[in-house]
Image (spheres, rainbow, N blue to C red):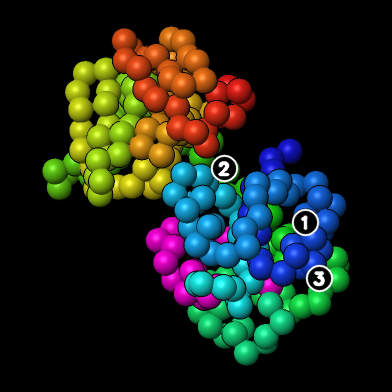
Amino acid sequence: MFKIKCIVIEDEPLAVKVLTDYITQVTFLELQATFKDAILATEWLRNNVTELIFLDIHLPKLKGMAFLKTLTHAPAVIVTTAYHQYAVEGFNLNVTDYLLKPFEFERFLIAVNKVKTATPQQHKSNEEQTIKGFIFLTVQKKKLKILFSEIVYVESQREYIKIVTTTKEYFSKLSTHEMESLLPANLFKRIHRSFIISVNRIESYTTDAVDLNGLSIPVGRGYKDVLENL
């Protein structure tokens, strides 16, 4: 059974406890982290991917709605707040549901089931990509077919990425986060904020680096668990 990875952005300790308790009761949810403000969550999201955010509106430093507007490719979002007047703005930003505090577990379950209904389609799309064996990427204004079997690694180059294959290097105007979402998760792993590698190309690894095709790729501090789960 697949699990929906989620994070909580909430500054009230009691609200964090309620959400954490509710999440542990739902078998298809996996809590990755909790954050007391959106700035900390933003930093975490630069190096990590999640599928669902539980988001409070009234947060210190950066308000919930303002945070939502900063997300280029937002995951599913369930807003949790004591203020009903933000509902319209929330739905305009395509949030999945709007939970008005205090809410019971039954209402929470209705909200996360909406996410569960949509998520299998994303997993199915990823599986179809694996079967297909390739993607088309825009390279020098052309849609170029790139085989998964030929990709060695992907490296961030500021607003571009470099795709290194067994025969050639390509540059495409994507972020590593966007590229990661396009690649089958069973074939490719992100091991650093700047690097995505092909699992099939790994020759050896330590906690600090991965060797593939005669190259040594560093392992980021927040990605040690990726290697443990290979």
Q: Residues within 10 Å of mark 2 (few under 14, many from 20)?
A: few
Crowdedness near tag 3: few (<14), some (14–19) or many (≥20) residues, C-alpha within 10 Å: few
Give, as a three-letter code, the residue at label 1: Thr
For label 1, the residue is: 20
The spot of residue 203 in percent (x, y) is 43, 9
Kindly identify the amino acid type of the residue bearing the numbered disc 2.
Lys
In this view of the protein, which residue sits in the foreground, 209 or 160? Answer: 209
- In the rendering, at what x and y percent does residue 181 appear? 45, 44
* Mark 2 secondary-structure assignment: helix
Q: Earlier in the sequence, mark 3 or mark 2?
A: 3
Q: CA distance from mark 3 to mark 1?
A: 15 Å
Q: How many marks can you see? A: 3
Q: Is residue 99 left or right of residue 145?
A: right
Q: Is residue 78 magenta?
A: yes
* Horizontal side of residue 45 vs 115, given as left or right: left
Image check: 26 left or right of 169?
Answer: right
Q: Nearer the viewer, residue 154 or 204?
A: 204
Q: Magenta part of the protein: which range?
A: 63-80
In this view, the mark in front (3 or 2)? 3
Left or right of residue 1, residue 222 in this image? left
Q: Nearer the viewer, residue 115 or 175?
A: 175
Residue picked out by circle 3: 107
Labels 3 and 1: the sequence-earlier one:
1
